[in-house]
Image (spheres, helix red, strand yellow):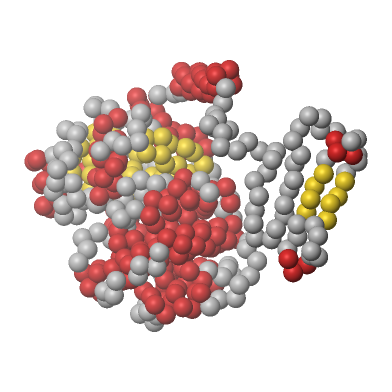
């Protein structure tokens, strides 16, 4: 009788391994199970059996917390949020606003979509501030001054009254406290050389342009002081995930300003930040500029994947590889890995690669769909910086001895030396190595 109170397990094994009789095993050291029904487990290959230790057909949700635990969890979340709000209020109370108060005039070089959006943004910061746009198109100039619209890029968005436009560099730059440079990279050197005599040597240049100069491989932090023949010209790079249209619509946006001069970066942060635009600061100018330049090339690759209907797996793998390639080059040039995972890196990459508002991605989509590059570019009224930057990126990679298969493939496609289909086959045939 005592033996019957011990747990007994009867194992019925796979028929190919058993005799006619099942094997009964006693476990005398296990706890006794008084007044419980005999538990028999039958183990048969391929026939799972419900566990006697787990509740079966229970109406209770195992993930549902008790009322007391729910209240405790909510309390923890509420306290964490209240601490964050108190910290934010304390920070804002100490934040300086003297930069905005002192600023009387801001000049914007270029009348494109992003230059116009930033001009409107700065003008909305203070009604008494003069915002002067230096544009080359007389029609755009008239449209801004007479109707307060940039008919070419934002025909439905009225500009603030304190935004004016001119084609005269001397008039635009006279008395400016800050300069927003929004001229495409490939045209910046000649443009800046033409206005250099009117530029104050202490005027801070905030660069909105992203890319590399094709023949010299220079970034804007090198182009601006060299074109102005002033190595001490104050420089700030503004970058991050920001479409001009959404900025014009005052949708929540976050960007980063990078300068080797920490005080200057904080000043520009004060000038630009508001309730719908967060501005972080950085001293990693190289990392911010390289990420901003290379993400345009990667966006073309992402567009090609979409245009060829290669699927979501391909898109994710390609962008992940592209992020690694950008990080490899940026760090070799002195940039910080943390910058590449921040707003100007991963943030801008995700926006440019996954959203169809990106003109670089649209170029890629059309290439992947079979259109010729020449036809695509001739139909666009905006510059896709990634097209011209691609070749410069590869030259820079060779200079620093960095292998960049995805971005190199884009450069080959831009040079009409490789078709998108052939590029995919070549990339998939590369050696399978350890991830770094």
Total labels: the figure holds: 0
Q: Quadrant of the N terminus?
A: top right
Question: Visible in this render: residue 322?
Answer: no
Q: Residue at x 43, y 58 (%)?
A: 295
Task: Identify whether 390 is placed above or below 293.
Answer: below
Which x, y percent locates residue 185? Answer: 35, 59
Q: Nearer the viewer, residue 401 or 77?
A: 77
- List the single residue furthest toward the front: 1
Q: Quadrant of the C terminus?
A: bottom right
Question: Visible in this render: residue 157?
Answer: yes
Locate residue 127 relative to residue 45 in the image: left or right.
left
Task: Identify whether 75 is placed above or below 334.
Answer: above
Q: Residue at x 81, y 33 (%)?
A: 33
* Image quarter of residue 177: top left
Q: Residue at x 58, y 17 (%)?
A: 68
Q: Nearer the viewer, residue 415 or 38?
A: 38
Q: Nearer the viewer, residue 110 or 244?
A: 244
Locate residue 43 relative to residue 326 in the image: left or right.
right
* Image quarter of residue 124: top left
Which x, y percent locates residue 326? Answer: 52, 60
* Image quarter of residue 256: top left
- List the single residue furthest toward the bottom: 417
């Amino acid at each position: 009788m005592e033996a019957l109170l011990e747990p007994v397990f009867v194992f019925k094994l796979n028929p190919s391994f058993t005799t006619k009789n099942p094997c009964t095993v006693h476990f005398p050291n296990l706890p006794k199970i008084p007044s419980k029904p005999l538990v028999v487990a039958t183990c048969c290959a391929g026939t799972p059996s419900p566990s006697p230790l787990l509740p079966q057909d229970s109406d209770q949700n195992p993930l549902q917390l008790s009322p007391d635990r729910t209240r405790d969890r909510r309390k923890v979340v509420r306290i964490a949020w209240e601490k964050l709000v108190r910290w934010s209020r304390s920070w804002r109370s100490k934040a300086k606003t003297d930069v905005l108060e002192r600023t009387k005039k801001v000049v914007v070089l270029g009348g494109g979509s992003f230059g116009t959006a930033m001009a409107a943004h700065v003008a909305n910061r203070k009604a008494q501030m003069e915002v002067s746009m230096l544009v080359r198109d007389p029609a755009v100039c008239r449209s801004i001054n007479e109707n307060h619209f940039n008919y070419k890029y934002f025909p439905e968005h009225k500009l603030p009254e304190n935004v004016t436009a001119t084609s005269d560099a001397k008039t635009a730059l006279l008395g400016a406290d800050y300069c927003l440079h929004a001229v495409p990279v490939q045209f910046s050197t000649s443009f800046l050389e033409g206005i250099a005599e009117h530029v104050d040597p202490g005027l801070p240049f905030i660069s909105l342009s992203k890319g590399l100069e094709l023949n010299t491989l220079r970034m804007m932090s090198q182009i601006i002081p060299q074109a102005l023949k002033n190595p001490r010209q104050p420089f700030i790079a503004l970058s991050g995930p920001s479409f001009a249209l959404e900025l014009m619509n005052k949708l929540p946006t976050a960007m980063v300003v990078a300068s080797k001069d920490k005080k200057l970066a904080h000043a520009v942060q004060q000038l630009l930040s508001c309730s719908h635009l967060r501005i972080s600061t950085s001293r990693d100018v190289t990392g911010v500029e390289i990420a901003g330049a290379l993400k345009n090339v990667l966006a073309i690759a992402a567009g090609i994947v979409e245009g060829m209907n290669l699927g979501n797996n391909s898109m994710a793998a390609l962008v992940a590889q592209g992020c690694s390639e950008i990080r490899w080059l940026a760090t070799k040039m002195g940039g910080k890995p943390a910058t590449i995972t921040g707003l100007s890196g991963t943030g801008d990459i995700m926006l440019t690669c996954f959203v169809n508002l990106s003109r670089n991605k649209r170029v890629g989509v059309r290439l992947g769909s079979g259109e010729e590059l020449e036809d695509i570019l001739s139909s666009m009224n905006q510059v896709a910086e990634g097209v011209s930057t691609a070749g410069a990126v590869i030259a820079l990679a060779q200079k620093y001895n960095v292998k960049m298969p995805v971005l190199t493939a884009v450069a080959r496609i831009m040079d009409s030396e490789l078709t998108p289909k052939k590029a995919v086959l070549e990339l998939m045939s590369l050696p399978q190595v350890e991830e770094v």
